[in-house]
Image: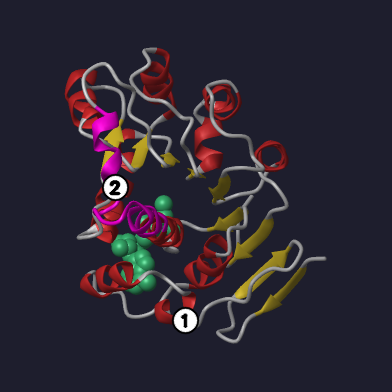
């Protein structure tokens, strides 16, 4: 059951869902991988914001998440940090099993004509937002070996495709451009382990629901019991509630701060 209460920092918080992990006091306690912690320090972040304190342990525990928090609350790092950390840990495990390398043994799989196969996908409503998330994800991935790429419309696809062909782990994309790339077999969604939808309410307001449903359900993405899905939104209207029940699996719902509707 859910409860709406003030946490120890007097932030109004509601958490519901089965066996929700406790919030983390600091970035170290959250359990982020070592290189990611170094990047957090490099960014000058001293302590996590409320939505980050609650989100990081949930995502690191492998749980699906529906998070509502207002603009400026630090949602980008709330999903980027645990996703990048999870990819780093998976890459280390894979390269250990292969007996070396920096988790990039799949490089040969890319090349002319092959679809890029990101392991994490972040959907965002606008070019500006995608570019912002891309910049932040790159900072958090510094010296991890992870390749972060971006794809948005309003600009020729050619350069973005050339960049994607060199390999991608984290792809930040707007829905329209991504559908186009997948339809041209330039991007494959079959290796997606993490799916994030940022500003989900804005994406719906902008009319992206058909593209989003196609990306999540009709383009080869692993089903919800296999991938891990996170939905971020400033508001939680019925349309978003439907997306959450369609796309998320045994998810934890958090509302941090006062949320408008
Ligand atoms: P939202 O997506 O919720 O609107 P952002 O992720 O864009 O918020 O973050 C808002 C601003 O706060 C950004 O400039 C970001 O770099 C900064 N920020 C985020 N988390 C922290 C933190 N833990 N410490 C200091 N600054 C932070
Ligand atoms: Mg944001």
Category of crowding for the residue at label 1, using alpha-carbon neighbours closer than 10 angstroms: few (below 14), some (14–19), many (at least 20): few
Q: Quadrant of residue 151?
A: top left
The relative height of residue 122 versus residue 214 in the rendered view (above or below) is below
Mark 2 — residue?
132
Screen quadrant of the N terminus: bottom right
Q: Quadrant of residue 251?
A: bottom right
Counting from the top left corner in percent of width and height, residue 250 is at 73, 52
- Name the side, left or right, on which 129 lies relative to 30: left
Q: In the rendered image, which quarter is residue 156 located in?
A: top left
Task: Indicate the position of residue 3 as horizontal and vertical percent values.
Answer: 77, 71
19 or 45, which is in the foreground? 19
Residue furthest to the right in view is 1
* 101 drawn magenta: yes
How far is the residue under mark 2 from the one under mark 1?
Answer: 27 Å
Compared to residue 179, the image places residue 69 above or below, namely below
Q: What residue is rendered at 42% in x and 26% in y?
A: 188
Image position of 164 with respect to 235: above or below: above
Count neighbours of disc 2 (C-alpha within 10 A) and say few if under 14, some if 14 to 19, many if 20 or more.
some
Badge 1 is on which residue?
Answer: 29
Residue 149, numbered circle: none
Provide the major secondary structure of the magenta segment.
helix
Q: Residue furthest front?
A: 99
Judging from the image, the colouring scheme is: secondary structure
Residue shown at 31%/53% (left/top)?
137
Q: Is residue 136 left or right of residue 245?
A: left
User: Is 91 in the magenta?
Assistant: yes
Which residue is at the front of the view, 222 or 135? 222
Q: Position of residue 240 (x, y in %)?
A: 65, 40
The verdict on label 2 being within 8 Å of ligand 1 is yes
Which contiguous range is marked in magenta? 90-110
């Amino acid at each position: 059951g859910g409860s709406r209460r003030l946490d120890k920092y007097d932030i109004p918080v509601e958490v519901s869902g089965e066996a929700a992990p406790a919030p983390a006091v600091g970035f170290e306690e959250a359990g982020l991988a070592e290189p990611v912690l170094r990047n957090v320090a490099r960014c000058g972040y001293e302590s996590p914001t409320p939505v980050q304190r609650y989100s990081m342990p949930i995502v690191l525990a492998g749980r699906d998440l529906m998070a509502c928090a207002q603009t400026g609350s630090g949602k980008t790092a709330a999903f980027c940090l645990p996703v990048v950390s999870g990819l780093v840990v998976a890459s280390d495990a894979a390269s250990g099993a292969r007996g070396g390398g920096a988790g990039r043994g799949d490089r040969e799989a890319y090349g002319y004509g092959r679809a890029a196969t990101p392991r994490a996908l972040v959907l965002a409503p606008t070019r500006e937002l995608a570019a912002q998330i891309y910049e932040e994800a790159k900072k958090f991935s510094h010296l991890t070996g992870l390749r972060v790429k971006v794809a948005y419309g309003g600009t020729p696809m050619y350069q973005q495709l050339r960049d994607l062909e060199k390999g991608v782990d984290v792809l930040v994309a707007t829905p329209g451009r991504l559908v186009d790339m997948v339809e041209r077999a330039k991007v494959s969604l079959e290796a997606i382990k993490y799916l994030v939808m940022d500003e989900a309410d804005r994406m719906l307001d902008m009319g992206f629901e058909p593209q989003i449903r196609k990306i999540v359900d009709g383009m080869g993405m692993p089903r919800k019991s296999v991938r891990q899905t996170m939905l971020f939104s400033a508001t939680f209207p019925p349309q978003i509630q439907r997306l959450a029940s369609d796309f998320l699996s045994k998810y934890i719902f958090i509302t941090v701060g006062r949320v408008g509707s």
